[in-house]
Amino acid sequence: MTRQLTAKTGFRISMAGAAAILATVIAPGAGMAGQILATSVAGFPNERTFNDPPVNAIDGDTNTYTWVTQPNNVADPSYLALGFELGTIDRIRLWKIPYGGGGNNSKNLIVQYTTDSGALSARTYTTVTNLVSGYLGTELWDGTVNTNGTVLNDVLDSTVSGWGSLTFDPVGATGIRIGFSNPNPTVPYCDGTTVDQTCNHYRVAEFEAYNSPLPEPMSLALFGAGLAGLAASRRVRR
C-alpha cells in the first residue's frame, strides 16, 4: 500500500507522487521543452536528390540549404516534412530566403502535422489551428499569417531579418510539414530561365520544430507541489 504524507497546509500526497512530480519538473529529459530532435526529413513529391537535398535543412548549418524538390518540379503544392518521436509540438522555426528557382519567390504555405508512422510522404496530415507569426514577440514572419494554418505571400528573408517562427495550438505529433505553392505564376512552363514560372521550389537552410516551455505560473505550481511533497516526507520520517 502506498504510504501517504500530509503537510501542515493539508496537502496530501504519496511519496511516489512527490517523486514523480519533481522528476517531471527538474529531471533532465523528462517532459522538457525546447527543440525537438528530428529523426527524418523529406521533400515530396519529387524530392531533391542530386544536390542540395532536404537533409541539409536539419544539419544545423545555415550556410547549407535545400531546394526541397527536383529541378523543373511543378507539383503544387509540394512539401517539406520533418519526422520525430511522438511528442507535443507548437512551433516551427525556419532560416530561409525567398528565392523560387524559376518559380514565384513568394510562396503560399500551409502547416500540417501527423500522428502516423512510416514514410513521411505516405502519412495523413491535419492542418494546425490558431497559427500566429513569431514567438513571444520575436522571430516574426514576413507574410500574411492566418489562424487557419496558412500563410499568404511568404517572403521571409533570414539574411535580412533572421529566424522566422510560426506558433500554433499544441498538438501531439510524430511529424510536421510545410506545403508550399506558387501564388500567381505568370509563365505557364518551367525551365528556370525566368522568374514567376510554374517551377515550385522552396529554398530552406534550416527547419526546426519546438515544444514551448510551460507558462511560468504552471511551472511554479508544479515545482511547489513537488517541494511540498518532499517537505511532508521529511516531517513524517522524523
Image: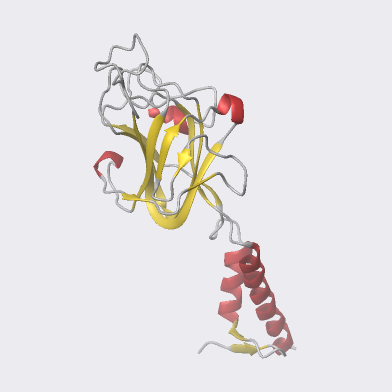
Note whether 73 is above or below 110 in the view shown: above
Q: Dividing the picture into quarters, in which one does residue 18 lie?
A: bottom right
Q: 82 and 148: which one is in front?
A: 148
- Colour approach in the figure: secondary structure
Taking the image as shown, residue 72 lies to the left or right of residue 145, namely left
Q: Dividing the picture into quarters, in which one does residue 150 lie?
A: top left
Residue 171 in picture, x, y percent from top left:
42, 57
- Residue at 53% across, 87% down: 2
Residue 41 in picture, x, y percent from top left:
38, 36
- Residue at 28% across, 11% down: 191
**Count of residue discs:** 0
Taking the image as shown, residue 212 lies to the left or right of residue 180, namely right
Residue 67 in picture, x, y percent from top left:
39, 23
- Residue at 68% across, 83% down: 233
Note whether 87 is above or below 178 in the view shown: below
Q: Is residue 81 visible?
A: no
Q: Dividing the picture into quarters, in which one does residue 53 lie?
A: top left
Which quarter of the rendering shows the C terminus?
Answer: bottom right
Residue 116 in picture, x, y percent from top left:
29, 51
Q: Is residue 2 visible?
A: yes
- Residue at 27% across, 31% down: 76
Residue at the far top in the pictured view = 193
Q: 237 and 165: which one is in front?
A: 165
Taking the image as shown, residue 67 lies to the left or right of residue 29, namely left
Note whether 166 is above or below 20 in the view shown: above
